[in-house]
Amino acid sequence: MTEREVVLPGELIEEKKGRKAGSGTFFEGEKVFAKFLGIPRVNEIEISVIPLSGVYIPNVGDKVLGVVESVEISGWMVDVNSPYTAFLPLSEGVSGFVDTQRAELSRFYDIGDVIFCRISRVTKNKTTQISVREIGYGRGEGFRKLFGGIVIKVTPSKVPRIIGKAGSMITLIKNKTKCDITIGQNGLVWIRGEDKTKAIEAILTIEKESHTIGLTEKIEKMLGE
Amino acid sequence: MKKSDVKLISNGKRIDGRDLDELRPVEIETHVIDRANGSAKASFGNTEAICSVFGPRALFPRWMQESDTGILRCRYNMAPFSVDDRKSPGPDRRSVELSKVIRICLEPAIFLEDFPKATIDVYIEILQADGSTRVAGINAASVALADAGVPMKDLVTACSVGKIDGKLIADLCGKEDNYGEADMAVAMMPNKKKITLLQMDGILTKEEIMELLDMAVKSCEKIYEKQKKVLKEKYKRVIE
């Protein structure tokens, strides 16, 4: 795999040569062009572009944070920091039998509640469904309602930088500040703990200076004081 | 002052000392507004336009939503202090028309079908007007759209060309616009070599139009290089 300089929308990346034109690209004939501003990734199977900016668009399988917007008859509308409000059906939100004729759904999730969930379905015209159920068996991802704490917003394209390589950055912040932190791929971050102001400061610094080298050391120094 | 009273070309140079096909100094800056998803400022000599892009974001009222595609909304607005005599603020006949023209010229470049039911809002403010404000606005808008991470087929680059004192020129300034014989605004997608906007005011022959189009394409390429450089510089630091 090779990495190269940033490409602009409409800029030629490479000839297709039987490969797949992946996300962030479009092709005309044999030529593959970038769809938006980002870093091209080229390998033997696929040509794709990783965005450097932009809003979050739901994708099946993404682990996101959502804030309940309204309670419906058989589910909840959840804001997932994207142009599209997601629907959380009753059966995907709670386990066990619930009598919809009698039960008040705000008992489970009320307006303003924060949920860590996964995008379970996205239709062609972006009607989005989410779920708090785990896929398969095993350790699980910890999808649940998050109690207390606060939610902050960061740019979705900078989420990988906040997590760090194999979670190094986020573990550092968690250990230094003794906070519970959950990051959604949609750019919402939930923080709970004594030292949350420090953690917020650290995360916002990473967002602002995500392009600089030696960021982990800087954050370590910042939190060490 | 009558049209004939002004001498626009002397000794082969224009009133501001430029050659016939020379552009005014072009300056483009990106990410100037923190709260917007993307923004840019473009200046051509004394003409200055600032553009902010919001979205893709949810579109309300709901009757405006299209279930299979997103929509693009543009607003072109001149600041009251942008011209010599104070312009009364708010939309007027001219700015409503230009808003629509700019929307139509940007639409073919954007993958709107990627965002059904959503909207992309483009707000162009003219801070200082000295001719060719719409092309300055379009250039700023396309850089701002790229900065916002909006999927596009190509950037859109625009340039104005015209005719003064019987000579064909590129990038008209305010006086040349007012006292010249004709002016033409051209916007194109430079990589695709496709024209998305073509407006003309005045009297030109067919041959002159073809010649002006060539000139506009060449000028657009110069401006495209500038746009490209600005965006790459801005994001180069991000990846190192």
Image (cartoon, rainbow, N blue to C red):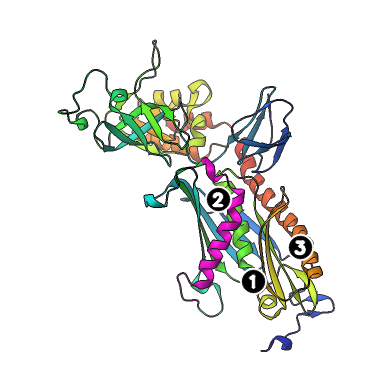
Q: Quadrant of residue B48?
A: bottom right
Q: Nearer the viewer, residue B42 or A56?
A: A56
Residue A195 is at least partly visible in this image: no
Q: Identify the residue position indicated by label 1 in the image.
A: B131
Subunit of label 1 = B
For the N terminus of chain A, the image quarter is top right
- Which residue is depicted at the point 24% across and 17% down? A96
Q: Is residue A146 above or below residue B80?
A: above
Instruction: Name the outermost residue toward the right.
Output: B11
Instruction: Name the outermost residue toward the top.
Output: A138
For the C terminus of chain A, the image quarter is top left
The Cα atoms of the two marked residues, 1 and 3, are separated by 19 Å
Label 3 element class: helix
Mark drawn on residue B213: 3
* Callout 2 amino acid: His
| Label 2 crowd bin: few (<14), some (14–19), many (20+), radius 10 Å | many
Residue B178 is at least partly visible in this image: yes
Q: Is residue A216 magenta?
A: no
